[in-house]
Image: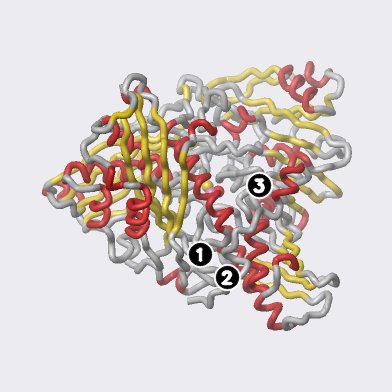
Amino acid sequence: MSELIESKAISTDLRRLDGLAKVRGTAPYAFDQEVENPAYLYPVQATIARGKVSRIDTGDAEALEGVIAVITHLNAPKLAQTDDAEYTVLQGPEVGFRGQFVGAVIADSFETARHAAGLVAVEYEADEHDALLRSDHPGLYAPEEVNGGFDTDTAEGDVEAALAEAAVVIDHVYTTPAEHNNPMEPHATVAVWEGGALTLYDSTQGVHPVRKTIAPIFGLEPENVRVIAPHVGGGFGSKGLPHAHVILAALAAQCSNGRPVKFALTRQQMFSLAGYRTPTIQHVRLGATEDGRLTAICQDVVEPTSRIKEFAEQTGVPARMMYASPNRKTTHRLAKLDIPVPSWMRGPGECPGMFGPEVAMDELAEACGLDPIELRVRNEPQIDPDSGKPFSSRHLLECLAKGAERFGWDRRNARPGSREEDGWLVGLGVASSTYPFSRVPENTARIRFNVDGNYAVQIGAADLGTGTWTTLTQIAADALDCPIERIRLEIGDTSLPVASVAGGSSGTASWGGAIIAAAAAFRNQHGDKPEAGAQAQAQGMKDPDTERYAMHSFGAQFAEARVHADTGEVRVSRMLGVFSAGRIINPRTARSQFIGGMTMGIGMALHEDGVMDARFGKVMNHDLAEYHIPANADIEDVDAIWLEETDHRAGPLGARGIGEIGIVGAAAAIANATYNATGIRVRELPLTPDKFL
Ligand code: MOS
């Protein structure tokens, strides 16, 4: 166990320290960064799903006044590393998906660049393509591992035998559609070359990871790439890894007569170039005794990957550890399709992967005549069924109990369709939530005591809008045992010590661990009355407990859904999440993370659906007019609370992650509520009105 840092500034609901700057418009986002004499980039995108560019005529574009250069695969500078097809931009005529970059215009203004891009004439030799996911897709294959480094398949016991003998069997296919990350700030990069060194102002979840990825692609030493991102307008995973636009901006800035190049993706371009959550087909089978004790859990997942770059969503992972059962099996199979490259989206794995099993649990509860909460109580494991290790802290049942009381679960009528109010069928639903805790030890922080009596606290972390500026200041204040006013936090720049990505719900615990280590080193070396200029640097420590315990956050999602009896319209009138995530660093920013995740879960449940037209390999609803997300009017009463808890095994902060768990289980809880309201079981997201008529 680590020695825990005491809560003084930590656990107070400090307002965002960057809030005023954001409201006043003085917080610079990537595209806002002032650079001298910038040029603007607009891309040309492929209009076929697979094949190659056979002819490209840039004459009309080049003739336009204000155009600096038009780059294509014929004249683009060569990249030093081309082993990742997503990043291999304009290096050859091949097209791997519709929307891929085939050219770019650099001009004096954005408008000129866009106009000129429309004048570039491209002819293609199209190959046959395949963009249609089917559960029996020919050529389904097992990847070597799935995202996060998890095993592709797991098996224990004999699920087939157990299912054959089970008193109660649930056997259904559940599907989730493609979902697209749409942070408010689009993906944007400003690229500046100076004497062989590259500076990128980039909208990213991690400046150091961008540097590490980009440097070898341009044949540079990492020290010659600087990435700067003080403020980021959301990411949800889509800015966790650089995408092709970062490479295109840097390439273009080599062809712009020395001018910096500014490039922001449009909302429509983001749908093919920023990553997205893959659709999933989940065959879930549960076997149980009459009194609802699971004897078999099986989840077989089919999902697509882009043919040019493998990404395997770890959809089957949460079913491995959620409930006790002697027989368990999970598999992932991929179909290689000619589609844009999928990637991380809030709660990779757990988010789609808890939909099928948590709806199936609702179906099993009904089949056994049990309350859905009681079913979960009966299948609560004593240790992690997957790893065999004890949990560092597992309070799922407390979350369910506390939520049931607060939400008024006792008013739920187990018979579906039994409550109608003014033409609306009303129902309640519940689902479990979970997300693994991960803390990246390879983080370094530096602390310097300034002449003005303040501490500079430096780490190359990121604030996506989630509150890092505020929470790391709180952690530093407690680690140095001083008031927060004396902390000068510096983040979002590769000139600061190395930090891991703001992803996988790992940021605060990982960076906070490094700050605590640096503060300890500083106080050790310089005491509490340091001289100006005193400094110390230290790396976060790997905690031996992370090997000995299974570490996950848990939660319970409760939803009240109203389904209109005549129109099928679905509304979520109430929602409550109860979470167990270790120590909460700042209740204000934490609450907004949780209810933000739950709101995104309402979008997943009711609205979001990336529609792939397989004939063209095109995401047809590629903007926010047609790709629906919840508006304020869709969000009624959403609340999140948490258990007061400190996880003594989760490092010196005692905190696990909170970034993703808010979305996990939300869609299942809502689907279960619509079943309780109507008696109609929808196993295919989103829960659109047609499915209730
Ligand atoms: Mo999160 S999807 O790991 O940014």
The amino acid at mark 1 is Arg
Which of the two discs, 1 and 3, labels the residue nearer the N terminus?
3
Which of the two discs, 3 and 2, labels the residue nearer the N terminus?
2
In the image, residue 331 lies at what x, y percent? 33, 47
* Residue that carries the numbered disc 1 in the rendered image: 583
Query: Taking 521 as reference, is 477 above or below it?
Result: above
* Residue that carries the numbered disc 2 in the rendered image: 7
Q: Is residue 195 left or right of residue 309?
A: right
Q: Nearer the viewer, mark 1 or mark 2?
A: 2
Image quadrant where residue 688 sits: top left
Image quadrant where residue 261 sits: top right
Picture residue at 82% right of the left edge, 39% below the top: 260
Distance from the alpha carbon under mark 1 to that under mark 2: 10 Å
Nearest the camera: 511 or 342?
511
Nearest the camera: 516 or 255?
516
The label number, if any, that marks residue 204 in the structure image: 3
Picture residue at 46% right of the left edge, 30% below the top: 607
Q: Are marks 1 and 2 in contact (CB under 8 Å)?
A: yes
Q: Is residue 616 left or right of residue 550?
A: right
| Residue ranking furthest to the front | 422
Q: Nearer the viewer, mark 3 or mark 2?
A: 2
The amino acid at mark 2 is Ser
Query: Taking 651 as reference, is 506 above or below it?
Result: above
Distance from the alpha carbon under mark 3 to that under mark 2: 30 Å
In the image, residue 50 lies at what x, y percent? 53, 26
